[in-house]
């Protein structure tokens, strides 16, 4: 796929996240995806761990939203600077619920065969 197609796909992925459509969001992942950034993991996480994290995250932060700021692409990689925000209503990763939050992220996505195959995030 071209860099433009990878960028468009990643933007559709974030749109699915903002609609809170987990099934559509997961459809963007390769079945062999490796995430080097899913919280509470000391090692690379595969698809089952990613699904478990996002399912728990959306349950604890029902108003979760992503705001994209910058997108840069070269070859099979797309780098995105974005902000996530919401109100955490339940405990998540040891943090108590009831607090609004804003978190800034810079994430690299590697695409393979039209799917997100690898992720690195700060």
Image (cartoon, helix red, strand yellow):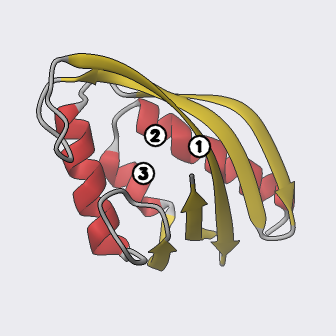
**Rendered residue at 39%/59% (across/down):** 26
Residue 56 percent across, percent down from the top left: 19, 47
To which residue does mark 1 refer?
12
Mark 1–mark 2 CB contact (< 8 Å): yes
Looking at the image, the residue that sits furthest to the bottom is: 32
Q: Height in image: 107 above or below 102?
A: below
Alpha carbons under labels 1 and 2: distance apart: 6 Å
> Which of marks 1 and 3 precedes in the sequence?
1
Position of 59 relative to 8 (above/below): above
Q: Which mark is residue 25?
A: 3
* Secondary element at image label 2: helix
Is 73 placed above or below 66 here? below
> Residue at (14%, 30%) from the top-left corner?
96
Asked whether the residues under the numbered discs 3 and 2 touch, taking CB atoms below 8 Å apart as contact, a structural biologist would say yes
> Element at badge 3?
helix
Name which quarter of the figure residue 64 lies in: top left
Q: Quadrant of residue 5?
A: bottom right
**Pointer 3 and pointer 1: residues touching (CB < 8 Å)?**
no
Horizontally, is 42 left or right of 90 in the view? right
Q: Position of residue 106 (x, y in %)?
A: 65, 45
**Residue under label 2:** 16
- Provide the secondary structure element on which disc 1 rests: helix
Q: Quadrant of the N terminus?
A: bottom right
How far apart are the two marked residues, 3 and 1, measured between alpha carbons? Answer: 9 Å
Residue 72 appears left or right of 50: right
Residue 62 placement (x, y as % from top left): 24, 27
Front residue of 28 and 60: 60
- Seen in the image, is 72 located left or right of residue 60? right
x, y (%) of residue 10? 63, 50
The residues bearing labels 3 and 2 have C-alpha atoms spaced at a distance of 6 Å
Q: Does label 3 or label 2 sit earlier along the sequence?
A: 2
């Amino acid at each position: 796929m071209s860099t433009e197609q990878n960028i468009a796909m990643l933007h559709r992925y974030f749109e699915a996240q903002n609609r809170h459509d987990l099934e559509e969001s997961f459809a963007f992942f390769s079945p062999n995806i490796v995430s080097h950034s899913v919280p509470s993991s000391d090692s690379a996480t595969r698809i089952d761990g990613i699904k478990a994290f996002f399912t728990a995250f959306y349950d604890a932060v029902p108003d979760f939203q992503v705001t994209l700021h910058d997108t840069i692409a070269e070859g099979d990689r797309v780098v995105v600077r974005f902000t996530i925000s919401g109100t955490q209503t339940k405990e998540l990763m040891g943090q108590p619920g009831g607090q609004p939050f804003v978190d800034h992220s810079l994430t690299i996505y590697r695409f393979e065969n039209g799917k997100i195959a690898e992720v690195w995030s700060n």
